[in-house]
Amino acid sequence: MTALFGHDAAVAAFRAALDSGRLHHAWLIAGPEGVGKGTFARAAAQRLLADAAGPPVQAPGLAVEPDHPTARLFESGGHPDWRLVEREVWKGDHIVPKHERTGTEELARGIKVRQIRMLDPFLMVRPTMSRARAIVIDAIDDFEPGAANALLKVLEEPPADTIFFLVSHAPERLLPTVRSRCRLMRLGKLDDDAMTSALSAALPDADNGEIASLVAAGDGAPGRAIVWRGLDIAALDRELLAIAREGDPVNARRSALAQALSAKAAQPRYEAFLARLPSLIATEARTRSGPALAEALALWERAGALAVAARRLSLDPQSTVFELAGMLAALAPEQGRRAA
């Protein structure tokens, strides 16, 4: 299992609840994308089941010794008392199991109602190895219409000794009835030391210079930095900063950027653009005050909403890049903006 770095307070809070024997039946693991929420949820589920089944776990935090029976079952993907619900991976007309994936398959747009209903048989029988069961949903934000209501029916009458771990990048957008049935656990961005440790462990072949570059680009989110490896995020940031500070009065910069990021081969850089642009607006906002700050914050909110919609609704990349870059250009001094 991937090692967990940072989040000491969250680990301590979960361990306190686990050790007390009064564990809430549903945990909403919330925070920015790429900070380790999914890793935390899997680690918490593994520790829960290891403690429940025995032998006693001696490792600190959420760790489980690699030779522990529960750890071996998790590693093989065959633990009978846990389920992971995530977007399916397809090739042609069939789902590809994780151990058979090559990276050329198609990722489903969202988590389907069918996947939530497929939990019913699992929940109708007794746990196999102990009294505990664990279900990780990564991420609940990816639910297609109807899936949240299907999950809500389970959360309203949770089966005994079943713990849910719901990963969410934007908990405020979830159904209030789902949120109200969960204990919220917020995970923040990692500091530079934790980022360095996480990236060094995940990328043992990377040198110190590359790690330092990814720490800067990742902005506290190692998962995001790993995905962005090799995309020259520094160059993308320079392009965006030029638009923010110098403007784009004749649309030349925005048009070139939109064309470059809309090509099929540029999909990874387009995804990075969607994540980086709202963050860059937020960074620029911190240098402002008064009406200029209010304007920047309004642009940040609009940019964030459009970036989320672009992913969920598969909006046209070229139009999306042009519109988002226009919000960035609105930060520039008046002479750098497009004439009305």
Image (spheres, grey):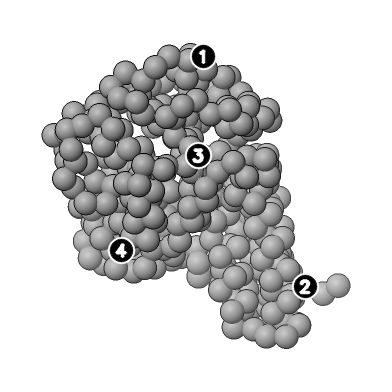
Q: Is residue 320 left or right of residue 63?
A: right
Q: Can residue 226 be seen in the rendering of this structure?
A: no
- Which of pointers 3 and 1 indicates the residue nearer the eye? 3
Identify the amino acid type marked 4. Answer: Ala
* Disc 3 target residue: 26
**In this view, 245 is above or below 85:** below
- Going by the numbered disc 3, the residue's amino acid type is Ala
Q: CA distance from mark 4 to mark 3?
A: 27 Å
Task: Give the position of the N terminus as an image quadrant.
Answer: top left
Looking at the image, tell me whether mark 2 or mark 3 is earlier in sequence order: 3
Can residue 303 be seen in this snapshot?
yes
Q: Is 161 left, or right, of 325 in this rendering?
A: left
Which of label 2 and label 3 is nearer to you? Answer: 3
Q: Amino acid at mark 2?
A: Arg
> In the rendered image, which residue does mark 4 sit on?
194
x then y, percent, for residue 59: 18, 47
CA gap, disc 2 to disc 3? 50 Å
Q: Earlier in the sequence, mark 4 or mark 3?
A: 3
Q: Tell whether label 3 touches label 2 (CB within 8 Å).
A: no
Task: Please name the residue that numbered disc 2 is placed on.
Answer: 338
Circle nearer the N terminus (1, 4)? 1
For badge 1, the amino acid type reads: Asp
**Precedes in sequence: disc 2 or disc 4:** 4
Q: Which residue is more in the foreground, 136 or 258?
A: 136
Gap between marks 1 and 4 measured at Cα: 41 Å
Say few, some or many: other residues with alpha carbon within 10 Å of mark 1 (under 14 / 14 to 19 / 20 or more). few
Residue 252 or residue 51, whichever sits in front: 51
